[in-house]
Amino acid sequence: MKKITFKSKDGLLISADYYEVKGHKGMMLLCHRSHCNRAEYRATAPKFNALGYSCLAIDQRSGMKVFGTSNETKDRAKAQNLPTGYLDAKPDIEAGIDKAYELNDNQAIFLLGSSYSAALSLLIACKNEKLKSVLVFSAGEHLKGVNLSEIIRHIQLPIFAASAKKEIQETNELFKGVNKKWVSQFKPKEAGFHGSKIMWESVKGYEKLWKAIVDFLSSNSD
């Protein structure tokens, strides 16, 4: 892992952790949940590396210090008096897609979102040709003033959707208008966890989730 920086769409400097696999089979952009930062993926990015995927985990401007790591993008945004709401992080994810696409020799990438960034990922995926597929964890109507379920009705991109057990119905509602052929939904038997933390080994039932993830990636990789 090495830390890199690049500019968001509005010029704000973004910090990211780059987990590179030589001769990788694909590239994944990893976006964190609220009140978090790029360190959300310190345990899971190496698992994707072991599967052959390079990963770029970014700090979005909507987040905070946790896991002993500062959200450096958020710190810069606050220093510049820039807003740091969920929708304000959209240009950060868009710039992250551009950077990951560049690191992938201008080939389509996998986009992974957690909680609010899962919602942003779906919003962006509707109009972004640099994406191969999207993986979302605890996606929902997290964006103020945005009717996400209506916006994504006509999405035509493979989607892997997972959530905590108590969030299954919310996920069902979000994707109810999307053609089922595009959505692979993982419904945990255990309690699970909100956001991408459901992939952590400390969360009961993570093995079945990872099997579903591997199956999805295998069926959507060249």
Image (tube, rainbow, N blue to C red):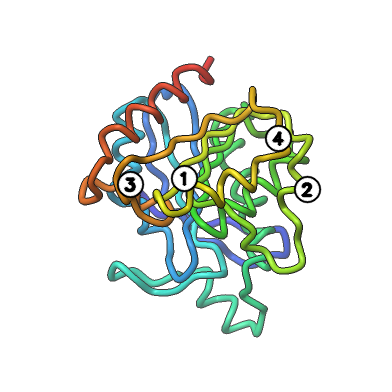
Q: Secondary structure at mark 1?
A: strand
Residue 140 sits in quarter? bottom right
Comparing 11 with 55, the one in front is 55
Badge 4 or badge 3: first in the primary sequence: 3
Q: CA distance from mark 2 to mark 1?
A: 29 Å
- Residue 183 in picture, x, y percent from top left: 59, 30
Q: Residues within 10 Å of mark 1 (few under 14, many from 20)?
A: many
Comparing 92 with 123, the one in front is 123
Question: Which residue position holds label 4?
Answer: 178
Question: Which residue position holds label 3?
Answer: 1
Badge 1 or badge 3: first in the primary sequence: 3
Which amino acid lies under the numbered mark 1 shown in the image of this protein?
Leu
Q: CA distance from mark 1 to mark 4?
A: 28 Å
- The answer to whether the residues at label 3 and label 2 have Cβ atoms under 8 Å apart is no
Up/down of 15 relative to 149, above or below: below
Q: CA distance from mark 1 to mark 3?
A: 9 Å
Q: Secondary structure at mark 3?
A: loop
Up/down of 74 relative to 96, above or below: below
Q: Please identify, in this view, whether the residue under mark 4 or under mark 3 is nearer the observer.
A: 4
Q: Please identify, in this view, whether the residue under mark 1 or under mark 3 is nearer the observer.
A: 1
